[in-house]
Image (cartoon, grey):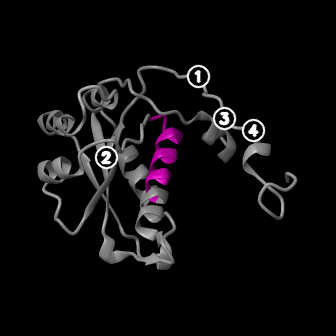
């Protein structure tokens, strides 16, 4: 599968099979995340892999009752929590490189998971303070995102994407398209 096919295959999934994820596949997706590029090669990201069912249940309390992501945390056999260490990154001219770099690492993980036949769903709408408390994350570390990780229980159709002409300009903003 080439990269375009992989990008087209990836979906945000909220239904998972209870089947365990093989250690080799978990190691593979984490290695792919580890190799993501970062500002000045500072590698400010950290990942917490949560397998324990009671701990996964407790993590759902960091979500609003109406958040559809809660259910996925319990169905998937693993949750991967993305953290960032601000002291290992910089804000330069208003750009928060910790957020950019951690996002790149998570995207590497998500695409590697799709390549391995695993599902994910990037989630960020939760109480950071609650997750920090549950997972004993130090105060100097940010909890940025989570994703369930497991085998999909559903096959989702692609959602509409913007046309290239809406997002790419040649030379200057709003100019002709590439």
Does residue 111 belong to the magenta stretch? yes
Residue 169 falls left or right of residue 43: right
Residue bounds of the magenta highlight:
105-118
x%, y% of residue 72? Answer: 32, 29
For residue 168, above or below residue 75: below
Which element carries disc 1, helix, strand or loop? loop
Give the spatial CA distance, label 3 vs label 2.
Answer: 27 Å
Asked if the residue under mark 1 is in contact with the one under mark 2, i.e. CB atoms within 8 Å, the reply is no
Give the spatial CA distance, label 3 vs label 4.
Answer: 6 Å
Identify residue for label 1.
157
Identify residue for label 4.
163
The residue lying toward the viewer, choosing from 122 and 30, is 122
Sort mark 3 into few (<14), some (14-19) or many (20+) by Cα contacts within 10 Å: few
Closer mark to the observer between disc 1 and disc 3: 3
Q: Residue at x 83, y 59 (%)?
A: 170
Identify residue for label 3.
161
């Amino acid at each position: 599968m080439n990269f375009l096919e992989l990008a087209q295959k990836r979906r945000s999934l909220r239904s998972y099979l209870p089947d365990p994820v093989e250690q080799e596949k978990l190691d593979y997706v984490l290695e792919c995340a580890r190799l993501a590029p970062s500002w000045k090669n500072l590698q400010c990201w950290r990942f917490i892999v949560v397998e324990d069912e009671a701990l996964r249940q407790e993590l759902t309390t960091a979500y609003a009752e109406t958040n559809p992501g809660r259910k996925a945390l319990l169905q998937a056999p693993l949750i991967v929590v993305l953290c960032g260490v601000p002291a290992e990154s910089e804000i330069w001219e208003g750009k928060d490189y910790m957020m950019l770099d951690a996002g790149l690492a998570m995207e590497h993980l998500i695409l590697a998971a799709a390549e391995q036949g695993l599902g994910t769903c990037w989630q960020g709408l939760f109480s950071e303070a609650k997750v920090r408390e549950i997972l004993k994350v130090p105060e100097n570390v940010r909890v940025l995102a989570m994703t369930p990780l497991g085998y999909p229980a559903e096959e989702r159709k692609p959602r509409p994407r913007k046309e290239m002409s809406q997002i790419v300009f040649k030379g200057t903003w709003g100019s002709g398209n590439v």
